[in-house]
Every structure is written in structure tokens, then in C-alpha cells.
Image (cartoon, coloured by chain):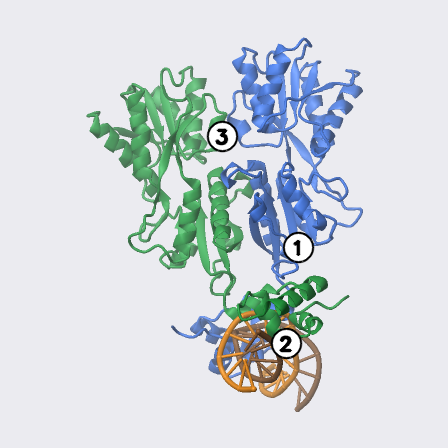
Chain colours: A green, B blue, C brown, D orange
Amino acid sequence: MTTRVTSFDVAELAGVNQSTVSRALNGDPSITDGTRTRIEEAARKLGYRVDSRAARLRTGLTATIAVVVIARAGLSVTEINPFHYSLLGNVCAAAAARGYQSLVSFQAERADLYSDFIESRQADAVVLLGTSTNDTAWEFHRHMLGRSDVACWGSPFADHRRIASDNRAGGLLATERLIKGGYRNIVFVGDLDDRQAQFRERFEGYQDALEKQGLGAGRAMNSPADTRFEQGRKSAQALIAGDEAFDALFCCCDATALGAIEELVRSGVSVPQQVGVVGFDGLGSGVHSNPPLTTIEPDFSLAGKMLVAAALGEADAGAPHRVPVRLVERSSAL
Amino acid sequence: MTTRVTSFDVAELAGVNQSTVSRALNGDPSITDGTRTRIEEAARKLGYRVDSRAARLRTGLTATIAVVVIARAGLSVTEINPFHYSLLGNVCAAAAARGYQSLVSFQAERADLYSDFIESRQADAVVLLGTSTNDTAWEFHRHMLGRSDVACWGSPFADHRRIASDNRAGGLLATERLIKGGYRNIVFVGDLDDRQAQFRERFEGYQDALEKQGLGAGRAMNSPADTRFEQGRKSAQALIAGDEAFDALFCCCDATALGAIEELVRSGVSVPQQVGVVGFDGLGSGVHSNPPLTTIEPDFSLAGKMLVAAALGEADAGAPHRVPVRLVERSSAL
DNA sequence: TTGAAAGCGCTAACAT
DNA sequence: ATGTTAGCGCTTTCAA
């Protein structure tokens, strides 16, 4: 058991005071090149590294951002939406680019819930993201949502700022794409309840597009189910069985679109020839579906940067909270 | 700017010594119920939280595991293999279950590379995982790979312990499944070079199965490409154009299998009727492919636990390093 | 330009 | 059962 190497050891070897070691290693300009070199050499020789706990205790900083991923209760982390994994990765990347480390936790069950990162000096800021459907988790974190050192994506609450895709623009883009493909009877598939602001916004964009073209007010179809995929499947089933004609679906998210496509194809409805489908999210799964899914994708990299900036308190009132989206052409729409 | 609340403030309000506050809040049994209650109340009233930096400096612990995800150079974190995201999530979950936090970093470019987590007292252990294809990154981390406080998944090096799927058993399972489906002319698709020990092991399992049935030594097909998906596509193309007959493919990973399926179907070869395909990994994308991909999937949850246990130095020589796999029946094999 | 000394907020050894 | 005291290893005044 060799005792740990401290700045005192380095100081002794270099023949200077311990505080000089600290200064030299932190790039203090008042240190002579000669002594700095001597100190660096001694440090290297001894394998010395600054103890981040001690340094941070003294400076009061943590240089880390806590990233909380909210998952569905009862599901394993393996089943987390790839969309949220992608968001997580981009938040970590954006944090790293700004010199912050990322303390990541996945929270689903009541026992996982924890939000004291800032108070216990484990992080300077918190980014919350994940499924809107875990009421318990969001309720637990609700008290933090207004704070200037907290940013979030996916909160079901409306009384605070959320970073999110530009859902309305995306809905418009998707619907205009379908109209351009010759479809005229476009149905929105998804739930429009209060907790799903994102879907409501996408629906509004859909309505904007219909209105522009004088195609009426549109209609929304939803068959609740345990998963978004099942939601899409059941909705398509209901539409096929129903009386009203339709020739295209704009789905609230990719998982729903994938379910809808599967059901349409299974029922002998050809996509995109008879019915066009556009999704929303940009999931990798859509690349390999049959047919590959045309969809709306947010700028993930920018999303990560915006979340980090907002968590670091840089999001003043005028800062944008909407992440730009783009149309990803694959082949589920003519 | 109100000054921060310390244990001294709590002690004063509760009328006890500061050290008593520390003991009470850490569950020291020698503290009377009465004083503990008084202290807890005072702490709550003042909104006091233990400063983890100070506590850890004193105890010498960090209670955190550093998780490094190695990505392909030049790719964004959005393009990271979902398999690695799943592994990441399960490592974090396993760490949390053992009282450890997870400090996550994504490393792809040279500028991202960093491995001093333990030396700088930011973590007690390191878990490395990610693509084997980033030579620079693995080379950078190579010096750590033998250590008892480091565990890894995906290293291209053979001279240290790696936690991995039970690839050989998986190869056997996949091939036996194809044989059971009536296929007799099964080709392995994937690269067998030295950096891809996992693929070689899968190939060996494939050979085990063929041998058991007296189906010869088998053959491997590979067309190098930038992505695994393209690798599968080009390999299928080459096979179709080639002289030798084949009626099934066991692909080294799901992405390759997905590419192969796409190319087969595009060429008018029906899957699974004319050619059966089995992959390896359990990617979510395989659920929505056409046809859905039958594949081999490791026990992700156990993988996370094993990686954490190994990083915490619990992996003695006798501990298993192979994560059990199971066959996921979908419909790319008869 | 460098040294001396204080102290970040806590836990733990030592008293009582 | 609780108080006293000494550090954990660093950064940062304050001196010189």
C-alpha cells in the first residue's frame, strides 16, 4: 500500500513550495518557465495528478452536469427510446465541448428518483430528458423545472420553458410533403391530450398545412395502447375498418408510424402507393422498415447544445427554445 | 448571495456539535433518537445537504464509476450503435443498483481521449465500451486494460480479459436454428480479421454446428465497406453474383444482416423462403425490418452487472466473462 | 516571482 | 452519547 502522491511530494522533489506547484500546474503566468518545467517534470516522475475532489472543494465548482434520463416505469433501460439515447449522447457531447463532465442517471421507478445533484454539490446544473409518460418521475422533478440551472426535454407540464423540436414547423413540413406527393385525405395519428404538448404542436402544424391548401380542418385518430408502436397499429386498423376515406397518415412519432405501416401492409394496403406515411423523430429503425420511413428529424447536435446552454443559465428570455427540424426523405411517401 | 449552509449552521440551530450532525446524518447508532430528530429537523429547516466533494475528500471515496463509450471517429454520437447505448444504459443501471454514480463520456476523436478518471479521483473504476474499430482510442486506453479497476467490452486486443457475449454459443445457436429450418448451405457473413475476436468466435460456433451435422467446414464471405450495413449489402450482392449455391446466411451482426436482407429482397430473393437469415445483437431495428430479423441477443442486464462487477475488482480468475445469449425468433428464418 | 498560511466542509480518531 | 480536534489535498489570499 503505497501512500498517495500529493502536491507536497511534487513540491519537495522540485524544491519549491507546495503552492508553487499548484500555481504552475494551473498555468499561473507569474511562474518562471524554469520552475514550471522543473515542477512538471517532478509531477510526471511521481505520476502526480490533481485530486479533483480537493480542487473542487476549494474552488466551489464541480464542472459537471447531471443528466437525468426518465424512462417508463416497469421497463428496462434496454427498452428506452433510441431518440432519448441520442439526445443523451448529444447532451454529453455538448457538455464535454464546454468543459463539463456528465453524471448520468436513468430514473424510472420510485426508488430511482433523485434530484439533489446541485444541492449536494455533485453538479452545477441538471438536464432532464425522457418520456413524458412517467408522471411520477416528472412530478418528482417538477419543483426544479423553473430553475435557471435546470433544463429539460419532454416534461408534460406547460408552466415552464422546455427545449423541444420545432414541432409545429415539423408538422407543417410533414404535411406539406404529403400534399406535394398528391395525397389529399391526410389523417393525423396520435394522442392530443394535455400531457403531450409536443403532439398537439405537431397537429397544429398539420392543420396549418391543410388550411394553406384549403384542405379543411383535418382529423386526428388515436387508439390508445401500451406502446407507441401498438398505438399506430391499432389506429391503422381502426381507420381501415372505418367508413371515412384516407390516403395518407401523418404520425405523431416514428414508433407510431412504424406500427401503422406494419398494419397497413399486413392488410394489403400498399405504402406509399395507396397510403402515404410520414413520421416524426428520425429513429434509426425507420431506415430498415418496409418501406423505409420518411420522417421529420430534429437537429440532435443543436438540441444537445441548447439543453446544455439552458442548464448553464444562458437561456435568457429571448433565446430560442425550439430545435430546427428537417425532412428526411425515405420512401413511405410518393 | 446568501452564504451556503454548512453542518456548522445545522449544529448551531440544533444546539449540538458539528461532528454530531455528521454522525446523525450518517446513521451513527450511538446518536440518541432525540438528538437525531432535532438535527434532522434543523437540517430540513435550513435546507442543508452534505457537500459530496467535502465528504469524499475526507473519506477518500468517489462512489462513482467512469463509463467511456468509444465511438467511430468522424461520426456523431447520434450514429452510435444502439447496441452500445443499450450497454451503456445497463452499466449505469447496474452501477446505480450498487450505490455508484456514473460519469459518462463519449470519446471518438483524438481530442476527446481521456482516461485519468481514477488517478484524478473522479471515479473508483472505469468501464470502457464501444466499437472495436476505433484503433486510436483503444490504443490510447490500452495501458489500462489489464487493471483490476477497469473492465471493458469491445476491445480489439486479445491480451486481457474482456466481458463479451458468449459468441461461440451464439454462433452455434444461430446456425442450429437455420439447420432446423431446413437450410443446408449456410454462409457466414462477416470479417474474421484479428481485431474482431467476437466475429471469429461467432464463426467458430457456426463451424461447431455445421460439424455436428456433418455439413462440412462452412465458408465465410466478406465484402469490406464503410458501414456494417453496407458490408452486408455488398456481401449479399457478391454471393448472388457468385457461382456457389447458398440458402442461408448467418451474419456477424444485425446491421450486416439488415444490409444483406435488403439486398436479397431487392434482388428478388425471398427471405426466408429462398434464403434464411439470422443476425447477432438484438437491435431494435430488426423488429421492423422486412422480414423482421431472427437474431441472437445477449442478456443486456447481466452484461451491465458483469461489467460493473469486473470494474469493481470482483472478477476473480474463475468468474465468467461471457454473457449468456438467447435466440430471438422473428421471421427471417423458416 | 515565490513562500507561508489559511481554510473549503466534511469525517473520523481521540477524548470525556 | 457527545464534544474536541485533526486532517483529507487542494486553491488562494497575504507577505515578502
Identify the amino acid type marked 1: Ala
Identify the amino acid type marked 2: Asn
Judge by depth and name the residue closer to the eye, B282 or A303.
A303
Say which mark, if any, is on residue B79.
none
Marks 1 and 3: in contact by CB < 8 Å?
no
Quadrant in which residue B327 is drawn: top right
SS for dot 2 = loop
The chain holding disc 1 is B
| Residue under label 3 | A285
* Quadrant placement of the N terminus of chain A: bottom right
Q: Residues within 10 Å of mark 1 (few under 14, many from 20)?
A: many
Whether residue B77 is visible: yes
User: Percent position (x, y) of residue B314?
Assistant: 73, 52
Say which mark, if any, is on residue A17.
2
The chain holding disc 3 is A
Quadrant in which residue B252 is drawn: top right
Identify the amino acid type marked 3: Ser
User: Percent position (x, y) of residue C9?
Assistant: 52, 74
The chain holding disc 2 is A
| Residue under label 1 | B125
Q: Nearer the viewer, mark 1 or mark 2?
A: 2
Residue at horizontal 61%, vertical 69%? B57
User: Percent position (x, y) of residue B220?
Assistant: 71, 21
Marks 2 and 3: in contact by CB < 8 Å?
no
Residue at horizontal 66%, vertical 50%? B308
In the image: residue B320, left or right of residue B51 = right
Instruction: Give the CA separation, mark 3 to mark 1.
Output: 34 Å
Quadrant in which residue B98 is drawn: bottom right
Instruction: Give the CA separation, mark 1 to mark 2.
Output: 32 Å
